[in-house]
Image (spheres, rainbow, N blue to C red):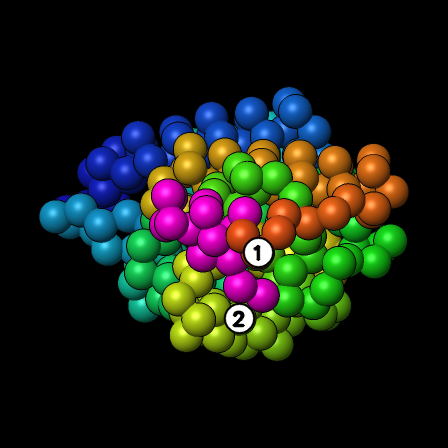
């Protein structure tokens, strides 16, 4: 298949990214040219990733200029891919169910790292049932220069460490930068991000002084919905 034909085949996926980016930008989850979005795509003629271009505003993405990366990490067409493609690929490799990754600089989540997170294993305590069911624990990834390879290593170690505890991570929080959130599709990833940002807002508005859900309450959520909380 020629590149023009392949680009046309991937256009619906690129349009989904553009729609998601526009929504996040309009609602203040990203600003300027911050943030990036990717999806893992497997069709009869393509196995790889689509990701937003570097320094692109998520509010004005052009689907025809989305960066296409093959399974080996080679860019085959589109504008130059975001520098976070290495991290996104590592997340996909470590988390088989992940089909979409969203990174933002969401206000309350970044503010939380400046004020001080709850603990390194989970930046927020379990304070609402939907936080437990839809998000789960979110580990803090220590500060590093954006794009540094140490972040890739740390994120993969966190994913694998939680897998050993029977927990499927949905997000990590990069110190002073923003969350990386992933899920089975873009709409689910965006819903997870929204729940996470709202929980951070509640926690900060309450002066970081909220009693976490009790172990018995967490156990009841696990028994009914299958969500495991461990940090």
Residues under numbered marks 2 and 1 in contact, where contact means CB atoms less than 8 Å apart = no
Q: Residue at x 75, y 58 (%)?
A: 118
Separation of disc 2 and disc 1 at Cα?
23 Å
Mark 1: give few (<14), some (14-19) or many (20+) Cα within 10 Å. few
The range drawn in magenta is 217-231
Which of the marked residues, 2 or 1, is nearer the chain's N terminus? 2
Residue 145 shown left or right of residue 1 in the figure = right
Mark 2: give few (<14), some (14-19) or many (20+) Cα within 10 Å. many
The quarter of the picture where residue 231 lies is bottom right
Circle 2 residue: 158
Q: Residue at x 26, y 33 (%)?
A: 8
- Could you tell me which secondary element the residue under label 1 belongs to? helix
Residue 152 in picture, x, y percent from top left: 54, 71
- Is residue 221 inside the magenta stretch? yes
The quarter of the picture where residue 5 lies is top left
Q: Residue at x 83, y 38 (%)?
A: 206
Residue 180 in picture, x, y percent from top left: 57, 53
Residue 33 shown left or right of residue 129 in the figure = right
Residue 197 in picture, x, y percent from top left: 66, 39
- Could you tell me which secondary element the residue under label 2 belongs to? helix
* Magenta stretch: helix, strand or loop mostly: helix
**In this orientation, which residue lies closer to the viewer: 36 or 194?**
194
**In this orientation, which residue lies closer to the viewer: 176 or 45?**
176
Residue 128 in picture, x, y percent from top left: 61, 39
Res. 203 visible in picture:
yes
- Is residue 227 inside the magenta stretch? yes
**In this orientation, which residue lies closer to the viewer: 33 or 193?**
193
Per the rendering, the mark at residue 39 is none
Q: Is residue 19 above or below residue 58?
A: above
Circle 1 residue: 215
């Amino acid at each position: 298949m020629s590149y023009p034909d392949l680009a046309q085949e991937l256009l619906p996926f690129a349009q989904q990214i553009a729609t998601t980016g526009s929504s996040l930008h309009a609602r203040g989850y990203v600003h300027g040219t911050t943030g990036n979005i990717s999806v893992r795509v497997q069709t009869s003629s393509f196995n790889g990733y689509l990701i937003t271009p570097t320094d692109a505003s998520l509010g004005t993405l052009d689907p025809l200029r989305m960066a296409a990366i093959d399974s080996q990490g080679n860019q085959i067409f589109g504008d130059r891919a975001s520098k976070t493609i290495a991290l996104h690929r590592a997340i996909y490799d470590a988390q088989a169910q992940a089909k979409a990754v969203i990174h933002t600089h969401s206000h309350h989540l970044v503010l939380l790292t400046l004020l001080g997170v709850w603990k390194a294993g989970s930046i927020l305590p379990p304070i609402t049932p939907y936080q437990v069911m839809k998000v789960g624990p979110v580990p803090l990834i220590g500060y590093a220069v954006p794009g540094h390879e140490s972040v890739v290593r740390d994120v993969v170690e966190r994913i694998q460490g939680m897998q050993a505890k029977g927990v499927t991570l949905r997000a990590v929080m990069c110190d002073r930068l923003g969350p990386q959130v992933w899920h089975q599709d873009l709409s689910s990833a965006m819903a997870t991000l929204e729940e996470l940002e709202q929980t951070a807002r509640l926690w900060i508005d309450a002066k970081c002084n909220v009693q976490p859900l009790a172990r018995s309450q967490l156990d009841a959520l696990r028994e009914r919905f299958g969500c495991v909380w461990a940090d």
